Amino acid sequence: MPSTTFAPDEPLISTIDAVAYEARTGLSATPKTLSPWLFYDEAGSHLFEQITELPEYYLTRTERSIFAANASEILSEAALGQGPSGKLTLIELGAGTATKTGILLAEAVRQQGSVVYQPVDVSETALAEASENILSNIPGVTVRSQVTDYTREALPLNRLPDTRTLALYIGSSIGNFMPEDARDVLRNLRAQLLPGDTLLLGTDLAPNGGPVANKTVATLLAAYDDAAGVTAAFNLNVLTRLNRDLGADFVPANFRHRACWNPAESRIEMHLESLIAQRVHIPVNSSGRAFTVDFARGESIHTENSYKFTSAAVDALLASAKFRKMKSWEDPQHLFAVTLATAV
Ligand code: AVJ
């Protein structure tokens, strides 16, 4: 995804090129795939916001409750080792609209009087919404937002004298990446940090991964296949996006949303399954040439992975990027974990 500034309803050519590239490479592969970043056009971002409020989608509200219960401890642990005049600066990867971050920012202001907040995201509109929310609700926060693709580019870390950085990577965003890519994203972040800086990582827990075995595969499946069909609409919207951005002729009604649990990989997978044998035409590709995609009945496009972690898996991932766990917090039902780690 390019870091170029764009309006959601009027993408620059470079965004279209990136979409075309993903469509051509992903849909000509076996099995067919599409990258999850394609979900987040204007309609898809709106659908995701709706997902976060669904009764089945426990992730967002659970992480928020962990922040609400532990913000004071999280911030003071992260500030350990600061000099007397030292302050924490918060940077957030993939900040989106930063709705949960407010709890942590308000606590940072309470503890240190003021805070500089640097949200990083590929979406300029999401960042604009984030700054507005934060600035109008939490006095004492200075916002410096940056449009960057943190998976491909160096982070624009503005290090102020006398400050330590607390990097936030929350919302289970890391779960979208295959293990090696997740490690590389954290290594890219680690490369911009100094020893003693910290990372707060939000991860969804594997079923029965916590000390109490009360998270089932059914809990997970419901979160990715809700009764109201919002997740189905979110998944199918990627086809509508390809129609709009590339002039493709997908008929979304000819596909169905499917979520499954892959125990060997410890991940939820989302697929779009073709209900019939069909041929789809895609007039625009990255080299400007049209191409066609044939689907057998029952064949699917793999659109997303959402990895679920044991606490040992979180430790190993952190260690592979030169972080060491300081402390972690879970909700009482052990659905979700928030882990604070220090750069070593
Ligand atoms: C935004 C990647 C954390 O994996 O739970 C929600 C995206 N996909 N429902 C997740 C998503 C289907 C979400 N993340």
Image (cartoon, rainbow, N blue to C red):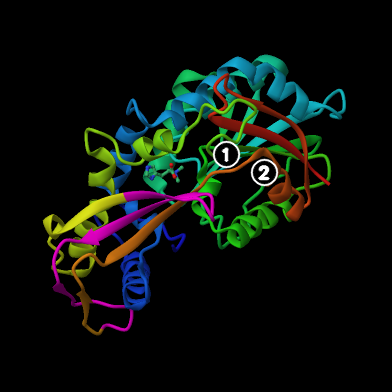
| Residue hosting label 2 | 314
The amino acid at mark 2 is Val
| For residue 343, above or below residue 163 | below
Q: Give, as a single range, the part of the protein colored magenta.
A: 259-288
Residue 290 placement (x, y as % from top left): 21, 82
- Tally of numbered tags: 2
| Residue hosting label 1 | 203
Considering the numbered disc 2 on the image, is that residue within a helix, a strand or a loop?
Answer: helix
Q: Which residue sits at x=60%, y=57%?
A: 179
Q: Position of 194 compared to 121: left or right?
A: right
Residue 20 falls in image quadrant = bottom left
Residue 176 visible in the shown view: yes
Q: Which residue sits at x=63%, y=41%?
A: 310
Distance (Cα) linking label 1 and label 2: 8 Å
| For residue 102, above or below residue 91 | above
**Circle nearer the N terminus (1, 2):** 1
Residue 155 placement (x, y as % from top left): 62, 53
Residue 130 placement (x, y as % from top left): 44, 34
Give ligand 1's quarter of the image.
Answer: top left
The amino acid at mark 1 is Thr
Residue 105 falls in image quadrant = top right
